[in-house]
Image: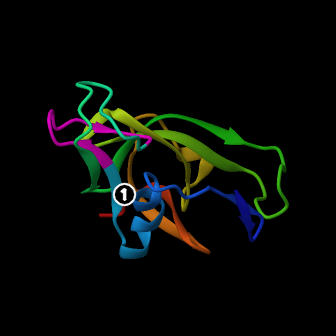
Amino acid sequence: MSTSAGRILPEVTAESRDFWTGGFDNELRIYRCRSCSGWFHPPVGACWRCRSRDVGPEVVSGRATVAAFTVNHHPWFPAFPPPYVIAAVELDEQPDVRLTTCLVDVDVDKVEVGMQVEVVFDEQDDVALPFFRPVTA
């Protein structure tokens, strides 16, 4: 892990590279099994459903639904003043695929389970971190 502008950045691996760099092309890339067509995250070398190793990243819509969230009020890092929202979002393509993320451009008092959100990217060094904001259109 590295740090950029106060943010702890992920270690990019061969399997996770497309996920962490897709945002530079404005694409959210999630692993999909070519045998059973199931989506899964985090990216690994085999499908957990059918055990196929014929898997790889594909572009998803970037639309999701808030499944759970918490509002952080503690000032853990100076670069991230509270309050801010940490959420688990379900991808529209397959609701059992959830990402843990931050919600941005949102009033923390208006966040609710079931809220429709869309991906936006925060480019930091060699990664584009996927965050989500309320759907605007």
Q: Is residue 121 magenta?
A: no
The residue sitting at 82% across, 55% down in the picture is 77
Q: Residue at x 48, y 58 (%)?
A: 130
At horizontal 84% and vertical 50% (from top left) the residue drawn is: 75
Task: Please identify the quadrant where the N terminus is shown.
Answer: bottom right
The foreground one among 130 and 105 is 130
- Identified at 42% across, 37% down, the residue is 98
Give the colouring mode of the picture: rainbow
Q: Is residue 43 left or right of residue 94?
A: right
Mark 1: amino acid: Val
Compared with 110, 11 (above or below) is below
Residue pointed to by mark 1 = 135
Quadrant of image for the C terminus: bottom left
Q: Where residue 12 sits: x, y (%)?
A: 55, 58
In the picture shown, does residue 114 fall above or below 118?
above
Residue 21 place in picture, x, y as percent: 45, 67
Viewer-closest of 115 and 43: 43
Q: Position of residue 55 (x, y in %)?
A: 26, 44
The image quarter in which residue 28 lies:
bottom left
Instruction: Residue 65: name its quadrant.
Output: top left
Q: Give, as a single range, the part of the protein colored magenta.
A: 31-42
